[in-house]
Image (tube, rainbow, N blue to C red):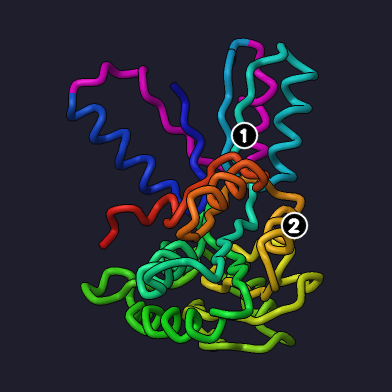
């Protein structure tokens, strides 16, 4: 096995390799090759002796690996790319405090730098204000600060370039809470946007979810599916039949009901 970590996160992968050696994994079985995409990623994608390749990252780079496979040995390629994942909250959802906790954890965990982050909160009009009040209350518990600090839950973004990109997304839309960005840190921020706004359509990959309001179930599902992505989705409702209809209608590879996929058990 060969692991090519992202340039910004190579130390974690190297530490895993050290632990593998300590655990008795024979030398040469688990290998870490840190470097840039052109230096390591592309050669692996084109190598005739690589039979299968798994990639997590941007959609643009994922397309390249499909081309590399087509131009080499037709190796098996598994891709996990970007997401603009909807959390659909219907009016009959029970325990809005718990719903808000899942939404907040899904949006802000790991500073939102997570492919399956809940980056679109699609909520029915009748409970919008009540839900947002609870969301803001939970979001205040996510303290921003030194990533190694024992009480910090939101650290710096992964790079200066990514920080600049995320900071630019804060200009223009209505800010429900947060909105500050300085010295590499973006505080947990909630935006209220129109469905055609760039913040609602493009992957921000930061702690900046967008709120979109709908009148009913069908509109919520249509809006959730109105995206070029299809990674993850969640739906919150007390109606079992409606949850099954939603699960079948939402176009996403992973779907959860009354919870975010990385939030179950987090409490």
The quadrant of the rendering that contains the N terminus is: top left
The answer to whether 224 is drawn above or below residue 137 in the figure is: above
Residue position for label 2: 222
Q: Position of residue 245 (x, y in %)?
A: 61, 46
Q: Position of residue 80 (x, y in %)?
A: 59, 39
Is 152 positioned to the left or the right of 229 in the image? left
Residue 202 occupies quadrant = bottom right
Query: Could you say which is closer to the camera, residue 35 or residue 246?
Result: 246
Query: Could you say which is closer to the camera, residue 122 or residue 196?
Result: 122
**Which class describes the residues within 10 Å of circle 1: few (<14), some (14-19), or many (20+)?**
some
The answer to whether 243 is drawn above or below residue 199 in the figure is: above
Q: Position of residue 230 (x, y in %)?
A: 67, 46
- Residue 34 part of the magenta-drawn span: yes
Residue 70 occupies quadrant = top right
In this view of the protein, can residue 212 be seen by the observer? yes
Q: Residue at x 56, y 61 (%)?
A: 87
User: Which residues make up the magenta segment?
Assistant: 24-48
Is 161 positioned to the left or the right of 117 in the image? right
Residue position for label 1: 79
Q: Residue at x 58, y 62 (%)?
A: 88
């Amino acid at each position: 096995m060969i692991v090519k970590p992202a340039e910004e996160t190579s130390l974690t992968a190297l530490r895993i390799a050290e632990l593998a050696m300590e655990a008795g994994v024979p030398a040469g079985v688990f290998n870490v090759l840190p470097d840039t995409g052109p230096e390591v990623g592309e050669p692996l994608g084109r190598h005739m002796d690589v039979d299968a390749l798994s990639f997590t990252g941007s959609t643009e780079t994922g397309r390249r690996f499909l081309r590399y496979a087509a131009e080499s040995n037709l190796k098996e390629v598994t891709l996990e790319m970007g997401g603009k994942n909807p959390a659909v909250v219907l009016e009959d959802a029970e325990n809005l405090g718990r719903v808000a906790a899942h939404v907040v954890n899904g949006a802000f965990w790991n500073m939102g730098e997570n492919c399956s982050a809940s980056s679109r909160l699609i909520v029915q009009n009748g409970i919008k204000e009540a839900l947002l009040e609870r969301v803001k209350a939970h979001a205040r518990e996510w303290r921003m600060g030194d990533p190694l600090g024992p009480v910090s839950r939101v650290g710096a973004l992964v790079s200066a370039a990514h920080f600049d990109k995320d900071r630019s997304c804060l200009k223009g839309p209505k800010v429900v809470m947060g909105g500050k960005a300085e010295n590499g840190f973006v505080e947990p921020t909630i935006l209220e946007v129109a469905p055609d706004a760039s913040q609602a359509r493009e992957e921000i990959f930061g702690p900046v979810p967008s709120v979109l309001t709908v009148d009913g179930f069908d509109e919520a599902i249509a809006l959730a599916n109105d995206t070029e992505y299809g990674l993850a989705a969640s739906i919150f409702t007390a109606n079992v039949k409606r949850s099954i209809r939603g699960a079948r209608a939402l176009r996403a590879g992973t779907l959860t009901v009354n919870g975010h996929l990385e939030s179950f058990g987090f409490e």
